[in-house]
Image: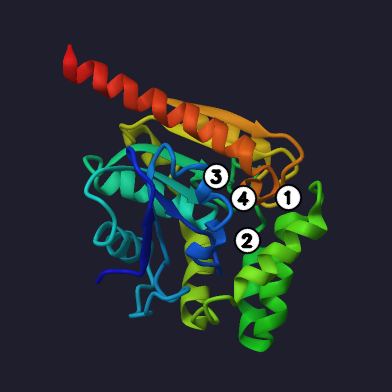
Amino acid sequence: MKLYAQTSGVGPELVLVHGWGLHGGIWDEFVPLLETAFRVTRVDLPGHGRSVWQGQETLDAMVAAVLDTVPPRAAWLGWSLGGLVAARAALQAPERVNALVMLAGTPCFVRQPGWQSAMLPSLLESFAAELRDDYDHALNRFLSLQVRGSEHAGRVLRTLRAKLLAQGEPEPAALQAGLEILRSTDLRAAGARVTCPVLLLMGERDMLVPVAAGAAAARLFPDARVVVVAGAGHAPFIQQPQLVADHLQAFLLRQHDKRSDEVNA
């Protein structure tokens, strides 16, 4: 099943996958910084924005829907939950993903033995319960956590709130499925099988996915680097859009040039 997607720009293919509860419109101010260098495709995950919910409750089902929608070969950038989607795509279809960027993302969002730079399981469980009882409050509380402690928190929170319902309310079942994916997914052991280069872009003041999680995650991938965005929380591309775009472009164009050299060798 194809999802709703928007494509703009000229250059190497780049796929953007949004985070929990939002939609492709969250990239509206960020995409213009990229589309002179890349052909950018941004999707709405199932049950978000303009994509219909058809019971895609598992991470693999979401990945399959995105793969069915986007170009056959591209770099993938996933924000937060979208980072898990992108990382799983790189594992499931390595021939489709030529570079992976996890923006405020991690292969495991929940604390485990030996993995302490992560959320407590009770946080996600409380959101799931609150969604059933007070949908609007749960969404707003999650948005508030994304900006807590960061520079310009008020401005970023207003942006997130304005975008949240701009394309209609996300499907409650899709939100519950996303929380379960965040709670239960652990791709740490699979990291060694990711064959493409990986960039972990972390917010310096991120309270949900701390910088230490990026450093720990980088050790799991064969070819990974970490970049920390100063002053940013869980949404660095809103707080420091030009800086994030510059880091992203430098990483992806370096990989593109390397592949071109290998082809021409």
Chain-order first, disc 1 or disc 4: 4
| Front position among marks 3 and 2 | 3
Q: Amino acid at mark 4?
A: Arg
Marks 1 and 2 sit apart, C-alpha to C-alpha, by 15 Å
Marks 3 and 4 sit apart, C-alpha to C-alpha, by 19 Å
Q: Which residue is mark 4?
A: 111
> What's the mark number on residue 121?
2
Pick the quarter of the image with the C terminus: top left
Asked if marks 1 and 4 touch (Cβ < 8 Å), the reply is no
> What's the mark number on residue 103?
3
Asked if marks 3 and 1 touch (Cβ < 8 Å), the reply is no
| Front position among marks 1 and 4 | 1
Chain-order first, disc 4 or disc 2: 4
Q: Amino acid at mark 1?
A: Met
Marks 3 and 2 sit apart, C-alpha to C-alpha, by 21 Å
Q: Which residue is mark 1?
A: 207
Secondary-structure class at tag 1? loop
Asked if marks 1 and 2 touch (Cβ < 8 Å), the reply is no
Marks 4 and 2 sit apart, C-alpha to C-alpha, by 7 Å
